[in-house]
Image (cartoon, rainbow, N blue to C red):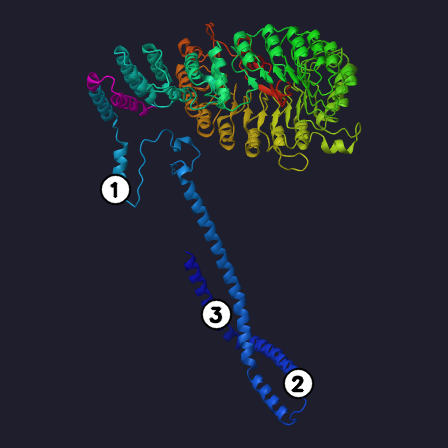
Amino acid sequence: MQRDIDDQERHAKDTCMKDVDRECQALYQTKEGKRLLKDLAKKLTDEIEFKARLKKGASSTASPVTDPVDKPIHEDAAIASKKADVDTMAKKQHAMQTFRKKSESITASYRLLRDELKAKIQVELADALSQDNRPLRIGCVSNACSNSKFFVGRLCHVAFYARSVDRDVLLRHFVTGTLDRAWTSDALFELSAVRFTKALEFAPTDGPMLASFAVNICSALKYDLEQRRSQNMYKAKVRRALGAFRSTENVEGCAEILRNLPHDVRFSDLFREAYACVNELRPTYWTRQSNVSLLELDALPPHFFMSGETKSSSMAGLSRDEVAVYADIIRRVIVEYPTQYGDGLTDLKWICDLETDSVVVYFVLWIRAGEDSRRFDLSGVPDVTDVDMDVVTGANRSCLAFNLHGCVHLTSTTLCTLSLRCSALETLDVGQIPHLTDDVLVALSKTCPNLKAIHMDRCPLISDVGVEALEACRDLREVGFGFCARVTDDALLSLASHTRLSALNVSGCLQLSDFVGLANILPASTTLTSLDISGCRRLTDHGIIAIGTRCTKLTHVNLAFCDKVTDRGIWVRCRPPPNIRTYVQTYVNVMLMLQAITHNCLDLVSLNVQELHLVTDNVFSFDQQGDGRAVVSKLLLAKLRTVVLADCKLLTDTGIAYLLHRARHLQSMDVSGCYHLTNQGLEFITTDIFNGSITGEHLTVLDLSYCMSLSSDGVRFVRERCKQLVTVSLTGCVLLQDAEVIELVKACGKIANLGLGFCRELSDDVLIAISDCLWLDSLFINRCAKMTDVGVCAVASQCTGLLAVNLSSCKRVTDVAVDRLYDNCPKLAQLDVTYCPHVTRGAASRFSIHRPGMVLRTDFESQGSHEQGEGSEAAAEKLFRQHSWKQHPVAVIGTSSHEQAMVDKPLRDAALLR
């Protein structure tokens, strides 16, 4: 290729020389050409004469005695001779200049070709080096954005042709490959099984024979798995083989079947049965020297139970039996190989002393994932017991952090022991353990001087005594006592002594009222960045104004439900105020309260003002008369990323326009329940009201629930501009039609959480479009009467990673859809099928039996752990409150990063039903 480019360049230059000569000859025949030659000749003549004079002067200086007569004669002859060639020299000079210019352009073009060739060669070499590591890709001939045009499934046969073949050959191969050979295959497998059975009668313990038989019997499981009938038929064959080995007490045969099962979660039941069969025949079979060694056995459970994943979060979808089997395998491995997990040096025999199987599995997955062995998060295994914690704290005395949120089986005594053993503890989260007392806080204050974060949300027995004891922990930075009803202003003032306090959560503490005193004595006013006082109904506007004025470094603020700013209460919109002066004063107080936050906290990132009924459009505009500071005018709401305006009844499209004009990088927005919001408001979300520039392109979360004035025309603005959306809630937007929702789904391909509840005009076409274009984590279609099994099955087949589904009051959904969700969505953790008359107890019971950690809500009577989510019926009710699974980001105090938290949304179903 390089030689070809050189030849082409040489030929191009030769051609260029000929073209230049031809062009010059034509030019010299014209007046312009003759004038050009005359000028060039004159210039050359001047140069020749100048050189001659220089030469004459040099020669006269070198030889002063010369013949004065002969010299002029020779010089004149030389000059005359040169003048005769001036025209020829001028022509050559002009031709060479023209050729040089064109030659340079040719050289530059071919230099570019050489560079492109070198780059192409480098790319090909890099592709060749990485070709072995790249997966095989199968193309398709369709440009349609639809999974119906893509190949979905597992490849059975791929034909590769090293040369061009005829169309007839391709057609013949295609016909051969598409023939249904299942019956022939089954017959061959049956024949081989019969012959293996006869052979095993003579050599029942022959290793190669058993291995070949296991490979033969398990190979059939890999074919035609998409059909339930075929899957059950092939599983039955394997079970018959296991039964035969059990009856003949052939433990090696059972072990070989266990080893050769396809690594797929669909064969989890066969794996458990084979493992139980081996343990039944010979409980001591699993050793270092066994045919299927312990280490080989240890590698199998993640493939059958968790699709190959080894993270602690993968435990969510495990059944009780799977957890029990996995824990038993782990205990056997640790007995023989105490340092098998983790860094290979740490002895983990203490794990065998744990009594709860789920805790055993959790710790192994936690260590395998490479997590910090000094920071444990046990919130995913709420069934941990006091015995388990005694073992854990006894073996890990250097722990720095424990997350025990929702571990309701733990007692105060156990946590006091934890604080005594782990004296270096820095972070502790024991929220939602209602029976904990002040003894825990007293013990922490005495034994853990380095405590930096304590979270005890929803612990109603905690009082001022325990909170005041924390004054001994001088390095305390994060405090969370949300919904602790016994906490009063005295405890709040004691928290003010912590100079490094950065996060404070006292949401739902109804006895708190004196925030003015807190703001006045708070030494950490410059370090406090996160404040959650939502639901503190006794707070006055003066307290919140004092906080906003002094704590100017706040970045996360939650003021939800703080609407009683005066003793007179708040005017309800449906009832006119008895005294208009009272209403005006209340309105002004609310405005001052919010402006104290927005105009002083210029680093504000998250703001929650849910259900502040008197919030109006003026909150998000600059108060030129009352403030007037130029820096505030420039930076007001500039850093805002998350805002919750749910149920702000006086907010209109203009307020949304003011907000998006200043918060141009907004990522999460909740305007649910703002019934004054119209299609024009959606236009203002995507277009600046003042200069017409694009806004809203950074939005990832948009909640428009129960904005019942919105129609399909308004959704068009969101579809065209907000391409980064991940969570969209259109619940209660009853005017929406299929066409616009389908276009939204196609345009915003990153949507993972979608709420369409109460959209009664939507049909299965929307669900089919979702299955074609999206990969969902959660789907809420409660009270969508037109949706049937067809749409739900389509979503369940394509979106196999679903975590939460709400089918409440979908009257046309039956057991078929529920069964499809069970079969295809192994990670499903939340399901609501209340008021679905065609869903039977049998279909729902599969979830409650095989997935104990799942939150399931039905109309049937509770059976055992039928409705268990957070460990109690109250927790399940919290997650499924009357067809509303909506959650909102607020200022968080419950995690070490205190970024965001999720709180429940109040009901609106009654309003819709009316």
Q: Quadrant of the C terminus?
A: top right
Residue 875 seen by the camera:
yes
Segment tinted magenta in the rendering: 197-225
- Structural crowding at the residue carrying mark 1, measured as other residues with C-alpha within 10 Å and reported as few (<14), some (14–19) or many (≥20): few
User: Between marks 3 and 2, how big is the CA–CA gap?
Assistant: 45 Å
Residue 780 seen by the camera:
no
> Which amino acid type is shown beneath numbered disc 3?
Met
User: Between marks 1 and 3, how big is the CA–CA gap?
Assistant: 54 Å
Q: Are marks 1 and 2 in contact (CB under 8 Å)?
A: no
Q: Are marks 3 and 2 in contact (CB under 8 Å)?
A: no
Which residue is at the front of the view, 219 or 860?
219
Disc 2, SS: helix
Residue placed under numbered mark 2 in the picture? 62
Disc 1, SS: helix
Q: Position of residue 799 (x, y in %)?
A: 45, 24
Q: State the mark number for residue 17.
A: 3
Identify the residue at horizontal 75%, vertical 31% (top origin): 632
Mark 3 or 2: in front is: 2
Q: Along the horizontal axis of the image, is 460 left or right of 156?
A: right
In this rendering, the answer to whether 25 lies above or below 134 is below
Q: Main secondary structure of the magenta part?
A: helix
Residue placed under numbered mark 1 in the picture? 168
Q: Position of residue 804 (x, y in %)?
A: 49, 19
Q: Position of residue 158 (x, y in %)?
A: 32, 35
